Image (cartoon, coloured by chain):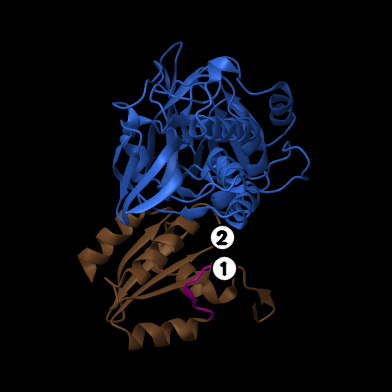
Amino acid sequence: MNTYDVIILGGGPAGLTAGIYLSRAKQSVLILDQGMVGGQVILTHAVANYPGLPELSGYKLASEMKKQAVEFGCEVKANEKIFGFNFKGKEKFVTTKSGEYRSKAVIIAVGGQPRKLGLESEIKFQGLGISYCATCDGDFFTGEDIVVVGGGNSALEEAVSLTKFAKTVTIVHQFDHFQAYAHAVKAAEDNSKISFIMESDIVEFTGDQSLTGVNIKNKKDETITKLKATGAFIFIGYVPGSELFKECVSLSRRQEIVTDEDMSTSVPGVFAAGDVRQKKFRQITTAVSDGTIAALGVMDYLNGVDPDKI
Amino acid sequence: MTIKGIYMTLDTNLKHIETGVELEELINSSDNVMVCCGRMGPMCVPVYDAMEELEGSGSYNHMEFRDMLFDTPEAGVIRNLPECASFRGLPFTIYYKNGKIMKATTSLQSKEQVTAILDEIV
């Protein structure tokens, strides 16, 4: 069995930051990611507000974080689906397809997945018009009419970036106001290619071989509008990836892992960081902060420091 | 690596297909070929990672795993396939058996999805 001081589940900004701190503190660290290392940040077209760095792609930022973690000695494994775990005792166990791993502490930093609308037709047209990544697929829709679903910062910022390609972008949002910051809303409102359909939901994606339209239901009068669109980009937030751990650690009503201010969960030796954790603000910088605190919390835990006596 | 003036940016451990002729020679000389045509983007990299792992697992030694940069003119041999006509998401992944296309997928596919396809068609 492979033994480490700390196993970190999730290789996004929170997990990688924790890995950097812990490996630099001479702990042996294994980062296991069930998908691609980098987390949700890799879907971001441009990160312009990460302190100290000029605007860069989310993919580039995540790649640099991974490189830094590896240089400090972290072992990083991607595509490691977690088959089982046992966090009850002093020793923690994680089982993946590649083997069983043991550690003294665990940090859960699995982040979340893009929230989907949950429509049957959404699955049918994924990759055939429906996308969750403007950076990846935007240029397939050059000169075409597309919709963006959502009203947060991601939706409005990506809608603006998609106007580089699309002829028109219609933002469909369920409320009569946006959750995005004022500057993002203004940038979208000032863009002549962007129009808005508020207080409405997409109820069906239509087409044959690929997407050709969307049916939009007005929430006030329940009328259905058929809109021609060959592309639909969905940015309606994230679902925390806590499902796997719901029998183990305490979760909030929204299925986020509950921690104290040291990122410690309800189970001794098990910490949580990043978007999977219960908190109000989800930014790359807050994930990095969580990762830092979780790493320091783990060090205290491993050193037997009683937080009540500090 | 420069291909006809275009900078090769697929930073993977897979063998790269660089020309249409090379692809044709491969599918004519190998029974089973999987080609992932994409960029170094978030939807593509997990597929490359899955291919690298499957290639290294030893369970698919009868399979040739390759990638191809989507933006080269030569990648038209993938981009313009009738099987990809409706595709609107990267990467385009093509599975060949005995020189024929058995399956084509668009957008992100998990390692489990790739494995299922390989087990089904190969």
Q: What is the display colour for chain A? A: blue
Magenta segment's dominant SS is loop
Residue B11: in magenta span: yes
Q: Report the Cα–Cα distance between label 2 and label 1.
A: 6 Å
Q: Which residue lies furthest to the top in this view?
A: A220
Residue A237 shows in the view: no
Q: Toward which corner of the image does residue A289 lie, by quadrant?
A: top right
Position of residue A25 measured from the top left corner of the image (x, y, whole percent):
60, 44
Instruction: Please give the chain letter of the residue carrying mark 2.
Output: B
Of A29 and A125, the residue lying toward us: A29
Query: What label sits on residue A244 in the rendered view?
Result: none
Name above or below for residue A238 compared with residue A39. Answer: above
Of A161 and A205, the residue lying toward us: A161
Q: What is the display colour for chain B? A: brown
Q: Earlier in the sequence, mark 2 or mark 1?
A: 1
**Residue drawn at 76 percent across, 37 percent down:** A51
What residue did someone put label 2 on? Answer: B40
Task: Tell me which segment is drawn in magenta.
Answer: B10-18
Position of residue B72 measured from the top left corner of the image (x, y, whole percent):
59, 72
**Residue drawn at 34 percent across, 31 percent down:** A245
Q: What residue type is labelled 2?
A: Met
Query: What label sits on residue B10 in the rendered view?
Result: 1
**Label 1 crowd (10 A; few <14 / some 14-19 / many >=20):** many
Q: Which residue lies furthest to the left in this view?
A: B120
Position of residue A65 measured from the top left corner of the image (x, y, whole percent):
62, 49
Residue B61 shows in the view: yes
Q: Secondary structure beneath disc 2? A: loop
Q: Which amino acid does label 1 sit on?
A: Leu
